[in-house]
Image: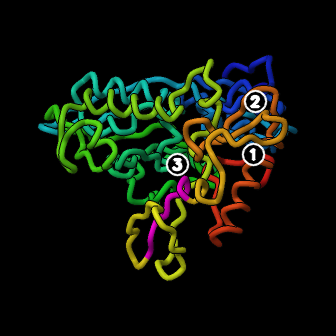
């Protein structure tokens, strides 16, 4: 059966993930726009084939055995602006590189996305994960999305953000294949000022008071510098960036169930709950930066214990073994179960 889009000759999914891990797909199709995405996904569904959507591959952990189905690479491009007073509606195609979008909005003098600078991946993945960093989440700025509903085989336009169940690093779109994001819309500020700087580390770096606003470009530069210092900006020559970003989410627990740990960062999470620092738990459970897994082929980042990195020559099995060791170490020490943030394809932790 022929599929819309361009079928690639190299089936290795490792070539399309930031971890550089993962076996082959049965077929890889590059979809250059929303119409090709709908046709490719719809065609695979009609043929009874499994579908894996791949953007930047920055949040995927793919099994060494690969994926027995069609992988659709989201490659559609396009950004449009609609100005209305002090606000601008920005419409972005799902295949746009996320950091390119942030850079473009900052160059336009628009405020809101600058704290999300340097995050790898495609724009279509941002509402699925409710991507967030340095005190800002996609949920703060998202207006609506266009979706392809695979159950009804129809395109739904302008689905409000309020219907997506956006919460800490999740949404109703995560963990299900029922809908494909085709484009997203954000409401950004047009007054030349950033979003309020709420994250203490960022405020200190900028030399400003918490909750103050400044120039978006200044905030973007500071965020990129902080992320580079933690090995969280992609660099093909830096193995600390061969990762899926933060591998574990910060656990959110009832206050009564949270362990009391000296020096552990924690934040109120509402409804009698507290969010604990996963990185702090990992460190206090005895895992240090650079802690290596099997044969040194995978390791915790040398700059950031929350990232599991591929040092070269490794396998997904190596990575999952290290992840399990860290998870079990934290559970054994503190009774807290860490949850993996990336999407696991054909494998479990």
Q: Which residue is mark 1?
A: 345
Query: Earlier along the polypeptide chain: callout 1 or callout 2?
Result: 2
Residue extending farthest bottom: 256
The residue under the point 58% across, 47% down is 306
Q: Which residue is mark 3?
A: 128
Horizontally, is 309 left or right of 197 in the view? right
Q: Nearer the viewer, residue 333 or 140?
A: 333
Q: Position of residue 108 (x, y in %)?
A: 24, 24
Q: Please state the extent of the stretch shown in magenta in the rendering.
A: 273-280
Horizontally, is 238 left or right of 272 in the view? right
Q: Is residue 40 above or below residue 187?
A: above
Query: Earlier along the polypeptide chain: callout 2 or callout 3?
Result: 2
Secondary-structure class at tag 2 = helix
Label 1 to label 2, Cα distance in Å? Answer: 11 Å
Q: Tell me, for residue 193, which label it has, or none.
A: none
Residue extending farthest right: 65
Q: Nearer the viewer, residue 264 or 30?
A: 264
Secondary-structure class at tag 3 = helix
Q: Position of residue 25 (x, y in %)?
A: 81, 32
Q: Is residue 49 above or below residue 92?
A: below
Query: Earlier along the polypeptide chain: callout 1 or callout 3?
Result: 3
Q: Position of residue 149 (x, y in %)?
A: 58, 49
| Residue 291 in sight | yes
- Which corner quadrant holds the C terminus? bottom right
Q: Is residue 320 magenta?
A: no
Q: Which residue is mark 2?
A: 13
Label 2 to label 3, Cα distance in Å? Answer: 21 Å
Q: Nearer the viewer, residue 78 or 220?
A: 220
Q: Is residue 279 magenta?
A: yes
């Amino acid at each position: 059966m022929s599929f819309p889009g361009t079928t690639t000759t190299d089936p290795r999914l490792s070539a399309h993930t930031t971890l550089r891990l993962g076996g082959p797909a049965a077929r890889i199709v590059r979809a250059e726009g929303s119409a090709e995405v709908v046709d490719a996904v719809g065609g695979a569904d009609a043929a009874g084939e499994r579908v894996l959507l791949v953007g930047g591959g920055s949040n995927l952990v793919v099994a060494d055995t690969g994926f027995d189905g069609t992988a659709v690479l989201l490659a559609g491009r396009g950004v449009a602006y609609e100005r209305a007073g002090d606000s601008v509606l920005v419409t972005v195609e799902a295949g746009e590189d996320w950091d390119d979008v942030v850079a473009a909005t900052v160059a336009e003098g628009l405020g809101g996305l600058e704290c999300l600078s340097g995050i790898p991946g495609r724009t279509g993945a941002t509402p699925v994960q409710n991507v967030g960093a340095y005190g800002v989440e996609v949920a703060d700025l998202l207006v609506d999305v266009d979706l392809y509903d695979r159950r009804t085989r129809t395109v739904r336009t302008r689905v409000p953000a309020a219907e997506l169940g956006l919460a800490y690093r999740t949404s109703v779109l995560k963990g299900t294949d029922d809908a494909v994001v085709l484009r997203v819309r954000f409401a950004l500020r047009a007054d030349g000022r950033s979003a309020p700087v709420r994250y203490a580390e960022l405020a200190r770096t900028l030399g400003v008071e918490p909750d103050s606003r400044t120039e978006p470009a200044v905030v973007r530069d500071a965020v990129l510098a902080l992320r580079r210092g933690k090995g969280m900006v992609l660099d093909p020559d830096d193995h600390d960036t061969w990762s899926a970003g933060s591998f574990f989410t910060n656990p959110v627990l009832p206050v009564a169930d949270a362990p009391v740990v000296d020096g552990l960062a924690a934040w109120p999470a509402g409804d009698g709950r507290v969010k604990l620092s996963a990185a702090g738990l990992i460190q206090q459970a005895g895992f240090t930066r650079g802690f290596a897994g099997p044969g040194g082929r995978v390791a915790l980042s040398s700059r950031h214990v929350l990232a599991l990195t591929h040092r070269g020559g490794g396998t997904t099995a190596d990575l999952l073994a290290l992840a399990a060791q860290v998870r079990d170490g934290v559970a054994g020490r503190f009774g807290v179960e860490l949850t993996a943030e990336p999407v696991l394809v054909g494998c479990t932790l």
